[in-house]
Amino acid sequence: SAELAELVRSTMGELTDSVRDVVDLLALGEPLALDALGSLTEPGAVEDAEQRGLVRIVGEPRLAARLAHPLYGEVRRTEIGRVRARRLRGLIATALASDDSPAEHLRRAVLALDSDLRPNPGQFLAVAHQAVALFDLSLGERLARAAAEAGGGFEARLAQAFALSWLSRGDEAEDILAGLSGSAPDDEAWALVTSGRLGNLFWTLRRTDDAERLLAETLEKTAGPTRSYFVAFRVVFDGCLGRPRQAVDAGLTLLDQPGLPSHAILLDS
């Protein structure tokens, strides 16, 4: 509320430019390693902010800074301004570049996403996969979309489509996957797109007739290990649609085939 925000401002007191920089950087990117924060602010600014009770230093042996209260960050984020916030996020992302840990890769990409830095589609795509693996599908879709818009091409659009489907945004996913079907760079990529379409049509959109029609067309024009993957889809569809005898018979026959790809075994099982 406006009253609470005013109380928080009063508690924080008047901020000098240097102390304000410390608070704003932490409001956008806490926690920050003490050396990284110090490199982005004037000498003595972090110390001043700590002495005023605005910042607390945590962690051993590597020290990091956090705001003394989360409401300080909430109030400052409403007042920073979009242009300044984009610039500060870019500074933080650049300062974090030396940290190679997966967690910092993710945090750096999210900061870069809303910064004034030049978009890096490779970075966004790699971290989109990481976000999806952590089940943060909304973030994964956002990062994949940013990668696609920055020129990430086929792989970025494919990652975005899968995330959209898992978010139950099946119509958007189908639009992307249908477009990618004709531009797949090789048979493996085409199979991945087609499997995505089958799953999206069948489970997310519940257009089972369309999914079965696409599966029949796919089985007609595929052979070898790739075909076994789509035969496994046939087994799953039969099981889900109340055709257990066909599912069991076809599934056992499929599992007897030598050299069956692992993804076909997983789907069939």
Image (cartoon, rainbow, N blue to C red):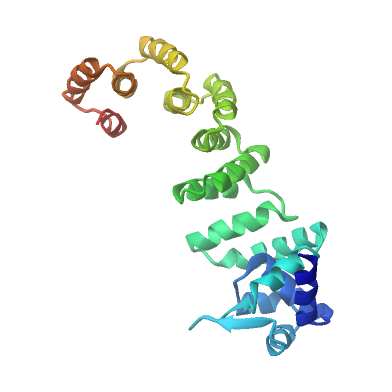
Residue 174, given in percent of the width and then of the height, sits at 55, 24
Specify the quadrant that holds the C terminus: top left
- Whether residue 250 sits left or right of residue 3 in the image: it is left
Vertical comparison of 222 with 16: above or below? above
Image label count? 0
Name the quarter where the N terminus is drawn: bottom right
* Depth order, front residue of 161/239: 239
Q: In which quarter of the image is residue 76?
A: bottom right
Which residue occupies 47% across, 48% down? 135
**Which residue is rendered at x = 36% and y = 13% of the image?**
219
- Residue pictured at 82% horizontal, 58% vertical: 83
Viewed as shown, does residue 23 lie left or right of 65? right
**Residue furthest toward the bottom?**
51
Position of residue 164 relative to residue 76, above or below, is: above
In the image, residue 36 lies at what x, y percent?
63, 74
Q: How far across and how far down the image is residue 129, in percent?
A: 49, 46
Query: Where does residue 246 sit, x and y in percent of width and height?
Result: 23, 15
Query: 16 or 102: nearer the eye?
Result: 16
Q: In which quarter of the image is residue 177?
A: top right
Q: Residue at x 52, y 44 (%)?
A: 137
Res. 240 image quadrant: top left
Image vertical order of residue 90 relative to residue 131, above or below: below
Q: On the rendered structure, is 72 left or right of 156?
A: right
Q: Nearer the viewer, residue 179 or 154?
A: 179
Look at the picture and state if 226 lies above or below 117: above
